[in-house]
């Protein structure tokens, strides 16, 4: 590899490591529940993981929902928010 190619590979690997921990939006099944279900709703993600909508907070600019997701090896609590007319992130 040339020195320039090595540098570009290093930059790409570094950038991907920085974004690896960023939260993605919910899958379609969870997003539908976030749009329509009350706190306490228990459902399943498209990959089969159970989730529960734990809490909701709203302001003039944003709606946020706290969701717990269980997997065989871990338990995650995530917060998804959206602006009016926007999508969950």
Image (cartoon, rainbow, N blue to C red):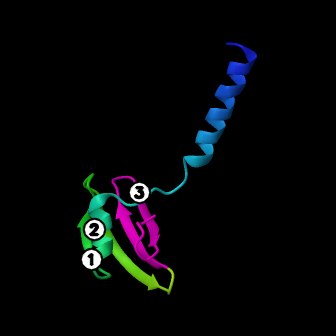
Q: Pointers 1 and 2 in contact (CB under 8 A)?
A: yes
Number of callouts: 3
Instruction: Find residue 15 and report its image quarter.
Output: top right
Q: Pointers 3 and 1 in contact (CB under 8 A)?
A: no
Task: Please provide percent x and percent y for residue 43.
Answer: 24, 67
Q: Pointers 2 and 3 in contact (CB under 8 A)?
A: no
Q: Is residue 73 rendered magenta in the image?
A: yes
Q: Is residue 14 rendered magenta in the image?
A: no
Q: Which residue lies under the disc numbered 1?
A: 36
Q: Which residue lies under the disc numbered 2?
A: 32
> Magenta part of the protein: which range?
62-89
Instruction: Find residue 88 and report its image quarter.
Output: bottom left
The label number, if any, that marks residue 74 in the structure image? 3
Task: Please provide percent x and percent y for residue 70.
Answer: 35, 61
> SS at mark 2?
helix
Q: Specify the quadrant that holds the N terminus.
A: top right
Q: Is residue 45 left or right of residue 74?
A: left
Mark toward the start of the polypeptide (2 vs 3): 2
Q: Residue extending furthest top?
A: 1
Q: Residues within 10 Å of mark 3 (few under 14, many from 20)?
A: few
Taking the spot 42% from the left edge, 74% from the top edge, the residue there is: 66
Q: Residues within 10 Å of mark 2 (few under 14, many from 20)?
A: few
Instruction: Find residue 2 and report its image quarter.
Output: top right
> SS at mark 1?
helix
């Amino acid at each position: 590899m040339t020195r320039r190619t090595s540098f570009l590979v290093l930059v790409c690997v570094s950038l991907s490591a920085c974004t690896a921990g960023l939260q993605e939006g919910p899958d379609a099944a969870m997003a539908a529940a976030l749009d329509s279900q009350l706190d306490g709703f228990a459902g399943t993600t498209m990959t089969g993981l159970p989730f529960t909508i734990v809490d909701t907070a709203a302001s003039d600019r944003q709606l946020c929902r706290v969701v717990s997701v269980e997997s065989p090896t871990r338990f995650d609590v995530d917060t998804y928010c959206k602006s009016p007319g926007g999508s969950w992130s």
